Image: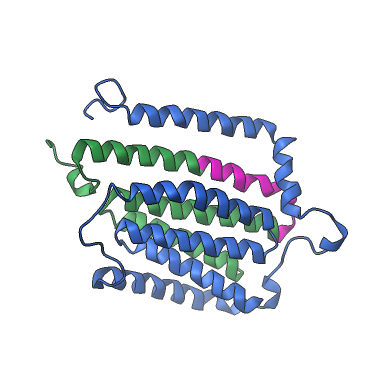
Chain colours: A blue, B green
């Protein structure tokens, strides 16, 4: 299990190094998909089944599809991935930097670093994160309403930004 | 600092470095921002799971809602930029006339 978690965390860092190393947006979106999948595995390993499901369904299904679609606006005839030298050099440089930082803090890593939620999981019907998320509907109702209001406001912001034709927020479109 | 803490801290710093240093495309900057938001989601969820504070488990959901707002506003700016300039390269955004 510890070995599996190390592999997942390594994939997390490699995926974000792939995003940050300035490739074409196609490959950056692919790296973000890798980061989301690995983060889902990390959350499952720590005992958060519902939050990982949220991450996988909402994030990958909702937001990254929009990002992958928007990558068509930034289309290039010759996309640069890790096959081209500047991108590969930047990715290797970032990974070496993370490795040096990991070597400095590695002395404090031992088996007890892996605490998970719900040590008495067999006595309860729900996982801890499910009952925690359910608190959003009772005690956190104000924040829920605020979030819904912000999402509605963002809808109108997006409509105003992409309207164009001399009436929206950007008149030059 | 446990390995999980180190992993999400380093992913946040990698996203921040990518956002700060490499600005060829606007979409690349948005993707780096999105990676930072993803590492923050994982950080909040791991905080909940490792400390057994289940009341805190709704905060990653709220963060995900706010990051959806941020991503949609950024992509709307990307669409507007692609319509005004024909491309999303940041090099062409500081032209005075297009």
Asked if residue B8 shows in the view, the reply is: no
Residue drawn at 38 percent across, 28 percent down: A159
- As drawn, is A24 to the left or to the right of B16? left
Residue drawn at 66 percent across, 30 percent down: A142
Residue drawn at 44 percent across, 65 percent down: A15
Q: x and y percent of residue B74 in the render?
A: 38, 41
Q: Is residue A171 magenta?
A: no
Classify B72 as above or below B48: above
Q: Nearer the viewer, residue A132 or A53?
A: A53
Residue drawn at 21 percent across, 62 percent down: A78
Q: x and y percent of residue A33 in the render?
A: 46, 59
Q: Nearer the viewer, residue A35 or A26?
A: A26
Q: Residue furthest left?
A: B97
Q: Residue furthest right?
A: A123
- As drawn, is A29 to the left or to the right of A72? right
For the image shown, how many numbered marks are present on the structure?
Answer: 0
Q: Which residues are magenta?
A: B50-66
Can you say which quadrant of the picture contains the C terminus of chain A? top left
Using the rendered view, name the quadrant where residue B1 is placed.
bottom right
Can you say which quadrant of the picture contains the N terminus of chain A? bottom right
């Amino acid at each position: 299990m510890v070995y599996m978690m190390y592999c997942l965390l390594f994939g997390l860092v490699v995926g974000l190094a792939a995003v940050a190393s300035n490739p074409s947006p196609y490959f950056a979106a692919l790296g973000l998909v890798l980061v989301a999948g690995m983060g889902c595995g990390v959350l499952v390993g720590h005992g958060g089944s519902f939050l990982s499901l949220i991450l996988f369904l909402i994030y990958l299904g909702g937001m990254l599809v929009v990002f992958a679609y928007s990558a068509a606006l930034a289309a290039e005839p010759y996309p640069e991935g890790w096959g081209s030298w500047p991108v590969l050099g930047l990715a290797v440089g970032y990974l070496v930097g993370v490795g040096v930082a990991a070597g400095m803090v590695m002395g404090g890593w031992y088996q007890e670093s892996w605490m998970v939620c719900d040590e008495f999981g067999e006595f309860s019907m729900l996982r801890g994160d499910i009952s925690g998320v359910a608190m959003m509907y009772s005690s956190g109702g104000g924040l829920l309403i605020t979030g819904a209001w912000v999402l509605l406001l963002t809808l109108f912001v997006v409509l105003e930004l992409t309207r164009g034709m001399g009436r929206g927020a950007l008149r030059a479109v | 600092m446990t390995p999980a803490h180190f992993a999400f801290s380093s992913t946040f710093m990698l996203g921040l470095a990518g956002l700060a240093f490499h600005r060829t495309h606007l979409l690349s900057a948005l993707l780096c921002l999105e990676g930072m938001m993803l590492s923050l989601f994982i950080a909040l969820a791991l905080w909940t799971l490792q400390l057994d504070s289940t009341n805190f488990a709704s905060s990653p959901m709220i963060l995900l809602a706010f990051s959806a707002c941020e991503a949609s506003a950024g992509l709307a700016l990307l669409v507007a930029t692609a319509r005004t300039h024909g491309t999303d390269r940041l090099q062409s955004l500081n032209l005075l006339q297009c």
